Every structure is written in structure tokens, then in C-alpha cells.
Image: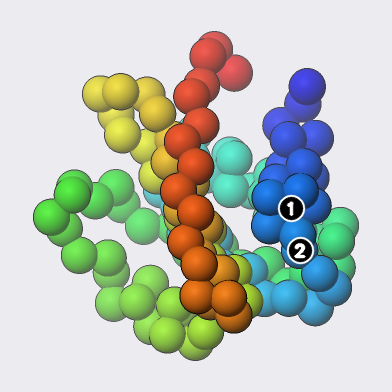
Amino acid sequence: MKLIDVSRTVMEQVLGVEKEEEILIITNPGEPLEISLSLFEAAREFEAKPAIIVQSPKGTLDYAERAVIEAIKSEPDIVVSISEKSLEKILTVLILDISEGTIKNIPIFLRNC
């Protein structure tokens, strides 16, 4: 299955994205960015309004950049954060649906993608 196909499935079946919804994607350079760009394109196919912010990887105790915090404060309908844990090669997708006040944490394990 291609990455864009997985991204479409995430948009439709996991997030239930609807037309005109604002989606903020927070990511890091490298492999997470590739996945984020695929999610961005899939969101556009669903006629949503995606935006991407790229910041350097952060440790568990590090704060997000001020621009990222301000973007979250703008209250987009959905926030997706994709970051790479370099030692474990696991991508964690944090999905925050502000309108429903729910958080879903979905680990994605990569195998030679």
C-alpha cells in the first residue's frame, strides 16, 4: 500500500475529516515530514484546509516552539503531531480533535518504508 493511500485512510476512517475543516500538522524534518506531506495532500483531497509547521525534534521535557503553540491556540479543528523517536524508529501520531476535546495517540511502526 502506498503512503498516500494510508494517508487517505487516516483522513477518512481515523479522523473523519470533513470539507473546510482546518487541520494543523506539526512535524519534524526527515521521514516524519514525508509522512506529513502525504497527510497534507490527502486532507486537500477531502477539501479540508491543512497547514504544516516543521520544527526541530524535541525531547520529552522540551517545550514546543512559540509559533507552534500559537498555531494550536488558533483552535484548528484537528491537530496532528508527527515526530520521530530516533532510537526506537517509531513514529507517534498525536491526534487532537479540539471540537470534541478528545486525544488519540496512535503509534505507527515503520519497516523499511
Q: Amino acid at mark 1?
A: Met
Q: Mark 2 or mark 1, which is nearer the start of the sequence?
A: 1
Question: Which residue is denoted by mark 2 in the rendering?
Answer: 17
Choose top left, top right, bottom left or bottom right for residue 84: top left
Q: Quadrant of the N terminus?
A: top right
Say whether residue 3 is left or right of residue 45.
Answer: left
Please determine whether, in this image, residue 6 is positioned above or below residue 101: above
Work out whether residue 13 or residue 5 is closer to the camera in this orientation and state it.
13
Give the colouring mode of the picture. Answer: rainbow
User: Which residue occupies 20% across, 65% down?
Assistant: 63
Real-space CA distance between mark 1 and mark 2, rounded to the nearest whole angstrom: 5 Å
Q: Which mark is residue 11?
A: 1
User: Which residue occupies 76% across, 48% down?
Assistant: 13
Q: Which residue is outermost to the bottom?
A: 74
Q: Is residue 41 visible?
A: no
Q: Which residue is outermost to the top?
A: 112
Work out whether residue 28 or residue 106 is closer to the camera in this orientation and state it.
106
Q: Is residue 16 visible?
A: yes
Q: Amino acid at mark 2?
A: Val
Element carrying mark 1: helix
Please determine whether, in this image, residue 50 is positioned above or below residue 66: above
The image shows residue 39 at horizontal and vertical percentages of: 67, 49
Please determine whether, in this image, residue 60 is positioned above or below residue 69: above
Say whether residue 4 is left or right of residue 23.
Answer: right
User: Which residue occupies 28% across, 77% down?
Assistant: 66
Element carrying mark 2: loop
The image shows residue 65 at horizontal and vertical percentages of: 28, 69
Choose top left, top right, bottom left or bottom right for residue 7: top right
For label 1, the crowd category at 10 Å Cα-Cα, with few meaning under 14, some 14 to 19 and many 20 or more, is: many
Disc 1 vs disc 2: Cβ atoms closer than 8 Å? Answer: yes
Q: Quadrant of the C terminus?
A: top right
For label 2, the crowd category at 10 Å Cα-Cα, with few meaning under 14, some 14 to 19 and many 20 or more, is: many
